[in-house]
Image: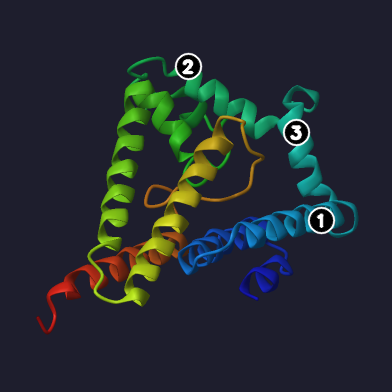
Amino acid sequence: VPFVLVALQPDLATATCYLPILAAALVLAGLTRKTVAVLVIAAVLVGLVGWNFGLKDYPKKRVMTLLFPGQDPQGAGYHVLQSKIAIGSGGLFGKGFGKGSQSQLRFLPARHTDFVLSVIGEEFGFAGILTALALFYLLLARICKSVGHSRARAGGYIVFMIGCLIGFQFLVNVMMIVGILPIAGIPLPFLSYGGSSLLANVLAVGLVLNVKMRRFANV
């Protein structure tokens, strides 16, 4: 229901963030292979119907830009091309803080939100991106480890679903800036500028800590 309501705004990118939460809950509930197969077939059918009758022109153009980014370098393909230039120009250790030409001269759009990792790649290089990836890995590893600390099944559900939500946003954003996925407008958790995104993720991690701290309650 939340997915449909947000998609109707229309904001399909934000709506997709509800899907990993649902998928995590269904996995923990113990889906059978038959149910998984039915859901996959249903998702494919819904996707085909949505592509032909539901999607507007701009999300379709984003998908086509993913396949052929060079066809419209000044339009739909501009974002991902500039992102690749920024990351590639950073080299191993980057150009230095505040010295990235693509980001500081504003060739790179949304440099403070969706493409903040591209800025890190340009100014701190491959080493900076590896550091960011390592920190996210540690965060997700700690969240997954906290699933086993829950004394109640509901707490384990909450922690696991939050881990899937943060991991989904992180994965989509990283794949988006290197041109593996279409530009979806999903921010990088805890790094992208934006009050609503930061607040939602901080509250989510707060729920994880809440579940973990109560593992010794009433012992």
Location of the C terminus (image quadrant): bottom left
Q: Mark 1 = which residue?
A: 45
Amino acid carrying mark 3 in the image: Thr
Q: What element carries label 2?
A: helix
Please tell me which residue lies in front, 194 or 213: 213
Residue at the image position 49 percent from the left and 18 percent from the top: 88
In percent of width and height, residue 161 lies at: 43, 63
In percent of width and height, residue 129 lies at: 37, 30
Position of 199 with respect to 217 (left or right) is right
In the rendered structure, find residue 65 and report the number of the disc placed on it: 3
Q: Residue 28 sits in which quadrant?
A: bottom left
Position of 51 with respect to 155 (left or right) is right
Q: In this view, does 78 lie above or below 160?
A: above
Residue at the image position 42 percent from the left and 19 percent from the top: 90
Of the numbered discs 3 and 1, the one sitting upstream in the chain is: 1
Q: Mark 2 = which residue?
A: 89
Of the numbered discs 2 and 3, the one sitting upstream in the chain is: 3
What is the CA distance from the residue labelled 1 to the residue labelled 2?
Answer: 41 Å
Picture colour scheme: rainbow
Q: Residue 35 sits in which quadrant?
A: bottom right
